[in-house]
Amino acid sequence: MIKDAARSKRNSVSNGGYDGDCALFHQRAGLIFQSLGDHDHALEMFNVELKMKGDKFGDDVSISYPLVNIAVIYSEQGKYKEAMNNCNRALGIIERVFGSDHPKVVITLNCMGDIYRRQCEYGKATDVLNRAMAI
């Protein structure tokens, strides 16, 4: 039912352009699918949100949120390289816009720490999480 609503909502947007309500709907649907353990549909929803925001705003801070959500899914699937690529992209955008010591950086650093932890790279995880705690 959620998939059908998402498809209907996306199809109602003219020319596949940006619609804030549609992007938010896909974000929330992705979070629901993620909580249900349905990674494939969560990724589909987050990727729609990312594409809509990316097409509208480019490499703006607004795409950092779906990037981190996608990274979490990839990490849960054991796709650590893809997860870290998304985190690094999000971190670069956030740091460029807000600076490296802004509280918004912490969310991405925590995600990166978890990815390192899942790979048993405890030294890297500790370094990243200590940086997050220092902010």
Image (cartoon, rainbow, N blue to C red):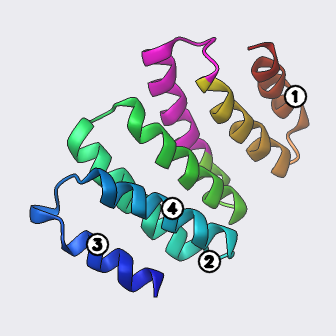
Q: Which mark is residue 64?
A: none
Q: Quickly name the residue at label 2.
A: 38
Residue 96 sits in quarter? top left
- Relative depth, front residue between 45 and 79: 45
The rendered magenta stretch, by its main secondary structure, is classed as helix
Q: Vertically, is 49 above or below 32?
A: above
Badge 1 local density, few (<14 within 10 Å), some, or many (20+)? some
Asked whether the residues under the numbered discs 3 and 1 touch, taking CB atoms below 8 Å apart as contact, a structural biologist would say no
Tell me which residue sits at (31%, 46%) in the image: 53
Side of 55 relative to 80 (left or right) = left
- Relative depth, front residue between 82 and 39: 39
Mark closer to the chain start, 3 or 1: 3
Q: Amino acid at mark 2?
A: Asp
Was residue 28 drawn as part of the magenta stretch in this picture?
A: no
Element at label 2: loop
Q: Which mark is residue 126?
A: 1
Element at label 3: helix
Residue 110 sits in quarter? top right
Badge 3 local density, few (<14 within 10 Å), some, or many (20+)? some
Q: Which mark is residue 9?
A: 3
Tell me which residue sits at (77%, 26%) in the image: 128
Element at label 1: helix
Between the C-alphas of marks 2 and 1, the distance is: 30 Å
Between marks 2 and 3 in the image, the one whose residue lies nearer the viewer: 3
Between marks 4 and 1 in the image, the one whose residue lies nearer the viewer: 4
Tell me which residue sits at (26%, 70%) in the image: 10
Farthest left residue in view: 15
